[in-house]
Image (cartoon, helix red, strand yellow):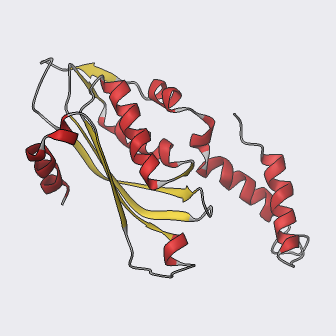
Amino acid sequence: MAIDKDAIREHIRGILVALGDDPDREGLKDTPDRVARMYEEVFEGMNYTNDEIATMFDKSFEHESTVTKDMVLVKDIDVFSYCEHHMALMYDMKVSVAYIPKGRVIGLSKIARIADMVAKRLQLQERIGTDIAYIMSKVCNTEDVAVIIEGSHSCMTARGIKKPGAKTVTTTLKGRFKDDLQLQNRLMMLIK
């Protein structure tokens, strides 16, 4: 599915009119085009399914043992997204992704690329974690995946309840991360 920039331009122009402004005035006349280009960039992930993202970033390598207790953790991956309820910015988001290799390891930059692409959709923070875990499981051929996300939501900080210090933390725990309390504790200690 390609993002329809012409439709975005038209609708943004309509929003400007609905707000009571003149879309032809100096400061606004290029705004519909700028917003369309911005949306194409920040919503790039909407062009791809989770399976397509897994294929895009499936750069994994054989790992010497088939079953290991070693954990791979990439933490503090900066991403941003837009909430599907208000189209409000989710910001200051830190994503941590851990997995236990099972015969394969993924290139570390690919983990950040997966997180970034998944976030570039109209999303819920909870779904970002679930989507990343699904893709990581598929690429790394392991069910042992954990995704922890902490972020701020402008739908809570800038409008409505207006609580600028509020943070949302979500956890997605799969495989051994779901059932092994020692592994969970080790993961949380490494993230802090």
Q: Position of residue 33 (x, y in %)?
A: 79, 56
What residue is rendered at 51% in x and 81% in y?
161
Position of residue 110 in the picture relative to residue 29 (left or right): left
What residue is rendered at 30% in x and 25% in y?
140
Along the line of sight, the residue nearer the viewer: 179 or 15: 179
Q: Quadrant of residue 104?
A: top left
What residue is rendered at 12% in x and 18% in y?
65
Q: Position of residue 66 (x, y in %)?
A: 15, 17
What residue is rendered at 56% in x and 79% in y?
160
Position of residue 45 in the picture relative to residue 189 (left or right): right
Q: Quadrant of the C terminus?
A: bottom left
Residue sitting at the far front: 179
Q: Position of residue 93 (x, y in %)?
A: 40, 60
Position of residue 24 in the picture relative to residue 128 (left or right): right
Does the image show residue 88?
yes
Q: Quadrant of the N terminus?
A: top right
Position of residue 146 in the picture relative to residue 186 (left or right): right
